[in-house]
Amino acid sequence: MRAIVYREFGGAEVLSYEEDAGRPEPAAGEVRVRVVAVGVNPVDHKRRYGRLEQFFPTTFPAVPGMEFAGVVDALGPGATGWAVGDEVFGLTRTGAYAEYAIAAEIAPKPAGLGFEAAATLPVAGETAQRVLHELGLNGGETLLLHGAAGAVGQVAVQLAVAAGATVIGTASPANHDFLRTLGAIPVAYGEGLAERVRTVAPQGIDAVFDAAGKGVLPLSVALRGGTTDRIVTIADVNAAEHGIPFSAGGTPPAEIVAGLARHARLAVEGKLAVPVADTFPLAEAAAAQQVSEAGHVRGKLILTV
Ligand SMILES: NC(=O)c1ccc[n+]([C@@H]2O[C@H](COP(=O)([O-])OP(=O)(O)OC[C@H]3O[C@@H](n4cnc5c(N)ncnc54)[C@H](OP(=O)(O)O)[C@@H]3O)[C@@H](O)[C@H]2O)c1
């Protein structure tokens, strides 16, 4: 099958496009999917550099990619609940940058949701939902969200605003009008951030979601009145030295599946969207990862397979 493969850690140059990579075979109870669209995530290049081995140990040759939308293509012995030809989207642990992947958590892709739009949702949806739950955010409260214009940030804005929260979202000025359309109050990151947040949120900050990981945890503690309570990061590797939890997963599979279905429903109803920032053919995955790594994608980069 066609796939992107890497055999050592390193920069984008370690990725090679191969026409005859080994096709994964579905074991008992497993479902194989013919991949149509793949979501590119920062975790893909972090793993490629070997920086996430404590969370996701790599076996070479490795195929990158966690999220996809596609069509069920084969069922392993005893696999139930799915039929060949079903359109699905979700997560894989065999690598999504490939023609075929073994499904981990999947849900039906509604007919009203395109493959590319569906592939934007699994990782950002699961992550945003998980962290808002960990923060215990309630309607009427004020959330400070670092990295609001990224894929995770955008979903978090939409879910939190829908739940009745006020969301202060950090982004570069070029993304402020966009964040307003999602219902967030945008503030520019960088020097003077704490003052800008105090100005737009004189009522105080009830919870902080750091989806940027750019050294804003001390400032976040100060904005919370000196407590580390109700601050969660998904991206700051120095979280522990600030006494702040780093959220890295752990959502039970059944909840991930329920979240996929819920977010697909919201997307079809026009209540949740992550814009496709750009699309690349599978063979150009290295270029897509370089754009992702540059750190200013608004929405989701998609590979078409
Ligand atoms: N732990 C987990 O479970 C988990 C899960 C998913 C993702 N993550 C991590 O969470 C982070 C976000 O993921 P993502 O998929 O949302 O990434 P993404 O879509 O690539 O995020 C890009 C966004 O980051 C913003 N940004 C860049 N520098 C910033 C800064 N200093 N302050 C605030 N925003 C800034 C950019 O906005 P501007 O262009 O306006 O600067 C851009 O919109 C990544 O580090 C990713 O690896 C962790």
Image (cartoon, helix red, strand yellow):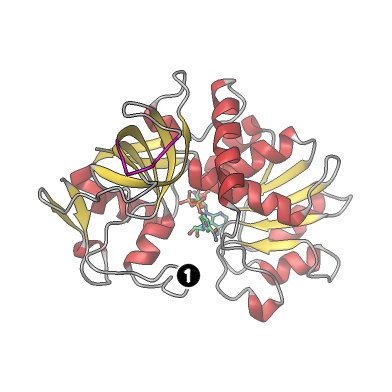
Q: Taking 183 as reference, is 203 left or right?
A: right
Residue 240, position as x, y percentages in the image: 65, 78
Instruction: Pick the quarter of the image with the C terminus.
Output: top left
- Residue position for label 1: 55
> What is the three-letter code of the residue carrying label 1?
Phe
Instruction: Pick the quarter of the image with the N terminus.
Output: top left
Q: Which of 260 and 180 is in front in this view?
A: 260
Q: Which residue corresponds to the image point at 77% horizontal and 68% vertical from the top-left?
A: 221
Q: What element carries label 1?
A: loop
Q: Which residue corresponds to the image point at 51% horizontal and 35% vertical from the top-left?
A: 274
Q: Is 101 a magenta residue?
A: no
Q: Taking 241 as reference, is 253 left or right?
A: left
In this rendering, does residue 148 appear at all? no
Q: In which quarter of the image is residue 269?
A: top right
Residue 95, position as x, y percentages in the image: 32, 53
In the rendered image, the vertical position of residue 228 relative to residue 77, given as above or below:
below
Magenta stretch in the rendered image: 74-80
Residue 224, position as x, y percentages in the image: 82, 63
* Residue projecting furthest to the left: 20
Q: Nearer the viewer, residue 23 or 170?
A: 23
In the rendered image, the vertical position of residue 153 relative to residue 220, given as above or below:
above
In the rendered image, the vertical position of residue 75 relative to residue 87, given as above or below:
below
Q: Which of 164 and 200 is in front in this view?
A: 164
